[in-house]
Image (tube, coloured by chain):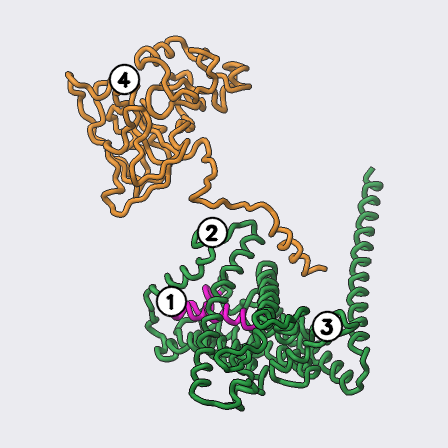
Chain colours: A green, B orange
């Protein structure tokens, strides 16, 4: 048990009290995740509404905060309908296969420092297994089954098409996801999420900037992870799996009531957990600039840091969702295989070379080179556009002269 | 930045004014010609305008109106004419609010208010009878408990346009005229959109074409129904005088 759950000081000496403690912690984690999912859904709807000149939910509770709760209660009282041609057992089990991995991924995210309650000292994270971040990859692999089996067992063609798209997409983007995680693991030297956070806790370049992986790895793996994770979650602009305009509702078309609620829940649980993973991997998790020494503040500040970072990442996802139109299927595959995987692979090699060469300024130089490359490309594009405009103007004025 | 330009747009939009309104708390003003729940009007002396001619029922494309006419009882007449609408029912499950009944009505007995927010929970309640449709003694529509009337819903309900002459004069056939007010009496027709060759003033502004109409026609309207009615404040040009 100690081995499985990692290096939590709570598990040094396991007795009955510790077992109870772990169970309570698991329930608390589930509760916190569910509440944060409700708030995330509300925040997404509100923010998207603001980005579309709307008000969003306003009626249920203050600022419409209880809207998702009301929706959840409503959907649970709906009739649970099973299509005639459905494979009943698989059809029933699929929603759970989607929800459970989403929750289990959240178990490895460190949301705070160490606290001491009832003479037990524990980490503020449900489990810190030595396999760490691989656990997240495994869970996102299992989550594919939920989507795939749901579509297959529904006995209907649109869900099947949706699930085929989903499995192809999730498998393709998992490679880019894994490669960008690879670069993180290269610099932190550990798979454990706690160790990855600790490695980022020190002061970085010049003692001013934090030593976050996003800076250490010169942004590239972060951007790739962000894109690949969006595809992995089937979030817009990669929501081909549920593309409403093409596939009705994709793999969950035939689901109603609890099954539908579970898929919906899983979708946003994935949003919350993936944002948490991004915070952990690239933004130093619950570490922050000010670390007080008084007991309560020492417990609360890391949680606050984590929540703030999490909110920013979630909002970024909502921003992406509100902005980008859905990709076509070939574009999706092109982006995954021809762009993200080669870049991720290349950057992994660069980082590895720097690590082996022990050249301290290499990352900075690589980042600078990348920045210069982007600026140059941008400048060339602007110049080309201007030249085209000028050519147009010349053509127009020439035509005018000829016409007069 | 090409594909990334959209991010700027969505970010800016966050701080712009909202286009939508918080509907039940805040409502947009309804347009002039809004077609809402019907009302059966009365003259100022309390007489019903409906003469039971069934033209509304005949013209109704949804077949939602049922009218039965009957001779007025000589000692207690319901309408000033020979006959009156003895049964008048509108099935609001079928009504499409096309306003053709209002167009067809020769006495402006039926008009449409701007109230559209009401509900019923069974098919019987969807059928409005005279008990619900006829205006109250104050000349205003009855505000029934299951209806959500807002200020102004019963005002300017005559913002409909008659394709035919409101007063039945053949000279004004095919002329668009704003006419008739909900409730008591008949307001003079206002200058509508098409009045070529009648009066430059009427054409340019909101001056009623009162003076433009044949003297006899006006006399007839005022004489028989006790002057121009309508609610105070809706007269488009109070200084004009009658």
Q: Is A19 rendered above or below residue B45?
A: below
Which chain is mark 1 on? A
Q: Quote the CA–CA distance across marks 3 and 2.
A: 39 Å
The residue sitting at 41% across, 68% down in the picture is: A260
Which chain is mark 2 on? A
Compared across the picture, whether B93 is left or right of A113 comes to: left
Instruction: State the residue in front, A280 or A101.
Output: A280
Instruction: State the residue in front, B193 or A313.
Output: A313
- Marker disc for residue B45: 4
The residue sitting at 61% across, 59% down in the picture is: A323
Compared across the picture, whether B30 is left or right of A199 comes to: left
- Which residue is identified by label 3? A215
**Pointers 2 and 1 within a single chain:** yes
Asked whether the beta carbons under mark 2 and mark 4 sit within 8 Å of each other, the answer is no
Q: Quote the CA–CA distance across marks 3 and 1.
A: 44 Å
Q: Quote the CA–CA distance across marks 4 and 3.
A: 86 Å
**Pointers 4 and 3 within a single chain:** no
Confirm whether residue A335 shows in the render. Answer: no
- Which residue is identified by label 2? A58
**Pointers 3 and 2 within a single chain:** yes
**Pointers 1 and 4 within a single chain:** no
Q: State the quadrant of the C terminus of chain A.
A: top right
Compared across the picture, whether A325 is left or right of B130 comes to: right
The residue sitting at 40% across, 20% down in the picture is: B232
Does label 2 or label 1 sit earlier along the sequence?
A: 2
Check disc 1 and report its element: helix, strand or loop.
loop
- Marker disc for residue A256: 1
Q: Quote the CA–CA distance across marks 1 and 4.
A: 60 Å
Toward which corner of the image does residue A373 lie, by quadrant? bottom right
Q: Is A295 rendered above or below residue B179?
A: below
**Within 10 Å of the Cα at label 4, are there few (<14), some (14-19), or many (20+) other Cα atoms?**
few
| Region rendered in magenta | A247-275
């Amino acid at each position: 048990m100690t081995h499985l759950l990692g290096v939590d000081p709570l598990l040094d000496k396991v007795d009955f009290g510790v077992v109870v403690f772990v169970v309570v912690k698991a329930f608390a984690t589930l509760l916190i995740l569910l509440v944060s999912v409700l708030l995330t859904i509300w925040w997404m709807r509100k923010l998207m509404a603001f980005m579309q000149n709307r008000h969003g939910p306003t009626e249920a509770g203050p600022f419409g905060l209880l809207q998702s709760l009301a929706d959840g209660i409503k959907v649970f009282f709906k009739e649970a309908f099973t299509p005639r041609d459905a494979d009943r057992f698989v059809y029933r089990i699929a929603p759970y296969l989607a929800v459970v991995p989403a929750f289990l991924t959240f178990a490895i995210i460190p949301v705070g420092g160490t606290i001491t309650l009832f003479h037990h000292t524990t980490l503020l994270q449900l489990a810190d297994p030595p396999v760490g971040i691989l656990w997240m990859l495994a869970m996102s692999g299992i989550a594919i089954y939920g989507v795939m089996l749901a579509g297959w067992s529904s006995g209907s063609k649109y869900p099947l098409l949706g699930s085929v798209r989903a499995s192809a997409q999730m498998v393709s983007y998992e490679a880019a996801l894994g490669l960008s995680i690879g670069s993180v693991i290269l610099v932190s030297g550990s798979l454990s999420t706690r160790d990855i956070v600790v490695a980022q806790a020190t002061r970085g370049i010049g003692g001013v900037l934090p030593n976050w992986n996003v800076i250490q790895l010169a942004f590239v793996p972060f951007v790739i992870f962000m894109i690949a994770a969006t595809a992995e979650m089937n979030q817009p602009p990669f929501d081909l799996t549920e593309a409403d305009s093409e596939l009705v509702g994709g793999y969950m078309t035939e689901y109603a009531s609890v099954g539908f609620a579970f898929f919906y829940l899983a979708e946003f649980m994935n949003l919350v957990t993936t944002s948490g993973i991004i915070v952990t991997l690239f933004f130093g998790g619950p570490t922050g600039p000010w670390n007080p020494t008084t007991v309560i503040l020492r417990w609360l500040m890391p949680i606050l840091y984590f929540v703030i970072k999490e909110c920013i990442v979630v909002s970024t996802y909502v921003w992406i969702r509100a902005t980008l139109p859905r990709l076509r299927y070939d574009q999706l595959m092109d982006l995954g295989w021809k762009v993200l995987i080669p870049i991720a692979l290349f950057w992994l090699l660069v980082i590895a070379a720097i690590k082996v060469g022990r050249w301290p300024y290499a990352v900075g130089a690589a980042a600078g080179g990348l920045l210069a490359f982007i600026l140059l490309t941008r400048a060339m594009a602007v110049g080309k556009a201007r030249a085209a405009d000028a050519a147009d103007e010349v053509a127009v004025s020439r035509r005018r002269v000829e016409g007069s | 930045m090409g594909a990334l330009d959209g991010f700027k747009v969505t970010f800016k939009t966050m701080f712009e004014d909202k286009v939508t309104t918080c509907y039940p708390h805040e409502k947009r003003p309804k347009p002039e010609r809004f077609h809402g729940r019907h009302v059966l009007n009365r003259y100022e002396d309390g007489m019903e305008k409906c003469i039971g001619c069934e033209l509304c029922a005949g013209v109704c494309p949804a077949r939602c109106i049922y009218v039965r006419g009957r001779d007025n009882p000589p000692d207690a007449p319901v309408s000033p004419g020979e006959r009156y609408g003895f049964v008048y029912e509108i099935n609001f499950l079928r009504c499409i609010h096309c306003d053709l009944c209002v167009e067809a009505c020769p006495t402006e007995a039926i008009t449409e208010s701007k109230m559209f927010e009401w509900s019923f929970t069974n098919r019987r309640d969807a059928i409005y009878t005279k008990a619900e449709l006829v205006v109250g003694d104050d000349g205003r529509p009855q505000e029934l408990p299951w209806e959500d009337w807002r200020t102004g819903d019963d005002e300017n309900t005559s913002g409909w346009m008659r394709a035919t002459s409101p007063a039945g004069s053949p000279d004004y056939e095919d002329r668009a005229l704003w006419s008739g007010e909900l409730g008591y009496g008949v307001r003079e027709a206002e200058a509508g959109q098409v009045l070529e060759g009648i009066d430059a003033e009427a054409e340019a502004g909101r001056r009623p074409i009162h003076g433009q109409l044949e003297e006899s026609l006006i006399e007839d309207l005022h004489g028989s129904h006790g002057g121009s009615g309508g609610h105070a404040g809706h007269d488009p040009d109070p200084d004009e005088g009658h």
